[in-house]
Amino acid sequence: MTYSEAIRFLYDLRLFGAEFGLENTFKLAALAGNPQDHLRFIHVAGTNGKGSTCAMLESIYRAAGLRVGLFTSPHLVSFRERIQVNRQLISEAEVVRLVEELRPLSKEFQSDHHPTFFEVVTVMALKFFAEQKCDLVIWETGLGGRLDATNIVTPLAGVITNIAFDHQQWLGDTLAKIAAEKAGIIKPGVPVITAADEPEALAVIEKTAREKHAPLKIVTTTDVRSRLAGTLAPPLVGEHQRSNAVLTLAVIEELQDKIPVPAEKIRAGLGTVNWPGRLQLVRTQSGQNVLLDGAHNVAGATALREALMGAPSTVSANCECSISHAELVLGAPGRMTLILGVLQDKDWPQICRTLAPMAARIFTVPVASERTAAARELAAACRAANPAVETSACESLRVALDQAAGDRFVVVTGSLYLVGEALELLGLSLSAGDERALNEWTACSAATPVV
């Protein structure tokens, strides 16, 4: 089997959709030798900030000398981003080997209960991390938590970053219902740390923790203001990243008796964390400043808006490309060109209303996804939100970048899929063919309902 054939096998698993439930994953993991029994985990759920929090945890524990596995999704460009050890992507050869070893196990399942893409990849990751003898695995949920394939593990700690509206068709149409799904990762007696602040959602998390006798630590905005100083700040831009950083510190403190980390290693790890595509500031060869951010839902768009309007210390202290605060704030006319592409199943009208008023020029584009919102519909919504500026619907991101080539500051946002495409087009990541298409999935019609 070649790497391209292994990717094709994984791609074909998308035909089985996303089966919400743990039975398949437990069975597949058992057939693979239950590798999760040989690993320690920090399990991270939440609506936004999961990946950034995972990256901070990984960086700190790696700085402390641990061998750290990192499991995240979706990937921006290459499938291999999903499975990393000490921030080294799994090799193509290892992907091939694991696919070859797991593919025969699927024959143990009835045809109407075939393992899905995410179930297979979850067990691939568990097997690889166990073989690599990882000291700790930072383990991000895929969708929800309660019925997510990642929930077959019993972690050292559970983390719930926040609760906001996203994936309502699967997780529920109220914050309480969504919180119940995320809180499903809470295990009896296992500590849980959260930065959720919506009262409706927090009440559900507190109730679940009480019922499972799980110690609960709540990180508040007061904690964020008091904990982060200049010597203890992440190089990730935005107030929401400061909240993620304080949440990360709370997790480290909770586990100090199990995994001690010296203060200097915490500073070193937090100070060198890297997480592409989330308020990532770059300067192109032509000198253009480009901000890439996967603000894929309303809460993410709000966080992006707040970061762009934030205090100079929040925005410019750790920038890679010397962008001045004046170029980032709302009141800088002619400074910000918005390139926006959103998935159809998101609340794209509200995302447009949140971001369009900040722009001096707007290009809307389709996302390279079966679920893309139409660029013309996005353009109409942006014109309604900001009728005073030029708004154009483009046939592709490449066309939009070409048309914005003379603009000084460009923001590309709306979907992580779009950010991944931008990384390739801007020459910031090697092309991985069509591997971004592996992020596509649809829920099985026979899936266990999320209630």
Image (spheres, helix red, strand yellow):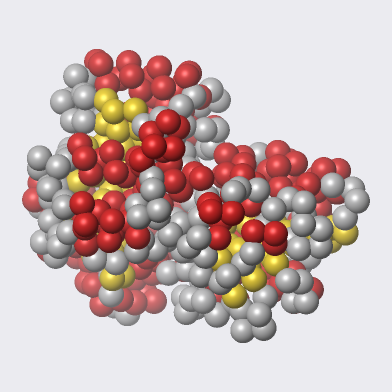
Residue placed most toward the observer, 285 or 277: 285
- On the rendered image, what quadrant is the C terminus found in? top left
Query: Measuring 47% from the left and 19% from the top, which residue is drawn there?
Result: 199
Q: Is the residue 322 above or below the residue 113 in the image?
A: below
Query: Measuring 47% from the left and 79% from the top, which residue is drawn there?
Result: 430
Q: Is the residue 122 above or below the residue 155 in the image?
A: below
Query: Measuring 54% from the left and 37% from the top, which residue is drawn there?
Result: 166
x, y (%) of residue 19?
Answer: 38, 41
Within the image, what quadrant is residue 354 found in? top right
x, y (%) of residue 159?
Answer: 31, 37
Query: Measuring 55% from the left and 80% from the top, which residue is drawn there?
Result: 427
Within the image, what quadrant is residue 207 found in? top left
Number of marks in picture = 0
Q: Is the residue 109 above or below the residue 87 in the image?
A: above
Q: Is residue 105 left or right of residue 3?
A: left
Q: Is residue 194 left or right of residue 352?
A: left
Q: Is residue 72 visible?
A: no
Point out the residue furthest to the bottom here. Answer: 285
